[in-house]
Image (spheres, rainbow, N blue to C red):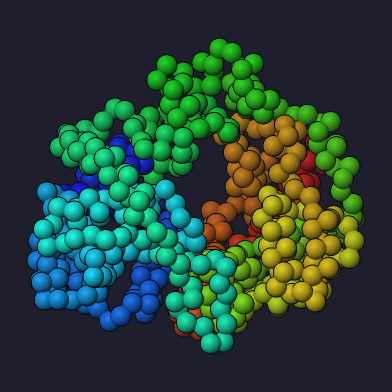
Amino acid sequence: MITKTNFIDGMQCQRCFWFKYNNYKDSKDDDPLAKQRKKDGEEVGQKVKSIFPKGIDIPFLGGDYSKMHDLTLKAINDGEEVIFEGSFLVDGVFIRVDVMEKTPNGWNIYEVKSSSSLKPEHKEDVGVQWHVLNQIKEISLQDAYVIILNKKSSKKDNYQFKDFFKKEYLTDKVKDNQKNISEALNNLIKIASMDSPPEIRKSSHPKKNQKCSFQEHCWPKVSDSKDSIFKLYRMTSKKKLEFYNKGIDTLNKIKNPSDFSDIQKIQIKSTVNDSPIINKDIIKKFISTISYPISYLDFETYTEPLPSFNNQKPNERIPFQFSLHIQDNESTIIDSESDSIEFLADHLKDPRRDIAAALLKEIPKKGTIITYHQSFEKGVIEELAKFCTDIATDLRALNERIVDLKDPFVDGGYYHPDFEGSFSIKKVLPALCKEDENLNYDNLNIKNGGMASTTFRNLKNMDDNETKILREDLKKYCWLDTYAMYAIYKKLLSI
């Protein structure tokens, strides 16, 4: 049976659809952020009911899709005018409609999303619902909408949930897309009957460059080796597959490296020779921009679809933690026992004012602020400045002192084969600092920003003992981010 969910997967990639349809493990299922987004979507789906008149809910009955279909038709025939989670099974295709609203001219259907913008897949999501509903004689359709969150609306004292929702009219686009929807469904029905996945990776979004969640099942085995063509920096998956299909599966099979960008040439040469490539002039140029005291700074943030605090917008980025290592001068040595400055907000309060004040109090008034991927930290500080208008000037002054530790690597100052085409701190750090066991994220209970974000959001649901343990885990994770920056910069100095 084809569901609305795996239909959307099939519109992205027909091979992914085959794996999903045949119950292969989806790596997204283990992603804490993906789990949180699913939970958020369910919460938004419940809250959106408040903007409609009282309606009837169609329960989810496990695998009894026919029973859910019959219950929905009964509600329609009984004269219900608002139906939540209307369920329909037609020709082996099963859909659940978030909201159905009867009007004098027919039924309006609404798909509810926890995002703050309209996305291409939303049109396809509503499109397959329209396709199925059009085949049911009891239903005459009027209009189709997607309900998203209104990112311009912020919480006030007397807010109502309807203030956070925004209806996007999609009827014309959905109708115009019905031929494509029908053809895609027919194709997926054929693929569902196949004993093995189709060879061709056919997508309705051929230019979309996204991480495949079935990579371990779907992609060539060579794709995970450091010399794989699939590890080439800044190249779309489609282009990598073109190389692979021509027999160029590893970087040493590339005949004309001159056709590639400068950083790709460096990666190819370094990987093929299994040796780092160093450009001291680039490293020196970066170091020349640094002045003491150096402040190594990292933030952790979260977003939530429905705001908890006044003057907070749906899905607004909220900083809740920072770590700060300070190196006073060249002779200052920082190690795992050195003092660092940490801030972790009260998880029951709006953290923005407190974190902004703590940052200005603790960070030195002069010197360079080193971050890794500076656009993130600069963006957080700018958002804090907009919220804390009385100290905005001082906050924005911090951004003028920020430099990005990633720059000398992206610019070609140092490339190591173990980077595997990535300049994330999780790749750069172990390649440069293998000897320091304190610089290993695998030793931590919280290993990445996604885990940190979801952990902090869920603290309000924990008991005191769990909260104490998890807050310590959060501190250890954020501490490592800034200690890692010091270790990387120290390595650049030694080079």
Q: Is residue 81 above or below residue 380?
A: below
Q: Residue at x 59, y 21 (%)?
A: 272
Residue 86 is drawn in which quadrant? bottom left
Q: Is residue 39 above or below residue 119?
A: below
Question: Which percent across, then down, holds residue 414?
Answer: 72, 33
Question: Which percent across, then down, holds residue 66?
Answer: 9, 61
Judged left or right of residue 18, residue 318 is: right
The image quadrant where one finds the C terminus is top right
Q: Is residue 70 above or below residue 89?
A: below
Residue 185 is drawn in which quadrant? top left
Nearer to us in this view, 214 or 283? 214
Q: Residue at x 74, y 46 (%)?
A: 405
Nearer to us in this view, 242 or 128? 128
Judged left or right of residue 271, residue 190 is: left
Nearer to us in this view, 390 or 79? 79
Question: Which percent across, then down, holds residue 426?
Answer: 60, 47
Q: Residue furthest bottom?
A: 158
Question: Which percent across, then down, holds residue 358?
Answer: 76, 74
Can residue 6 be seen from the camera position used here? no
Please count the marks in the image: 0
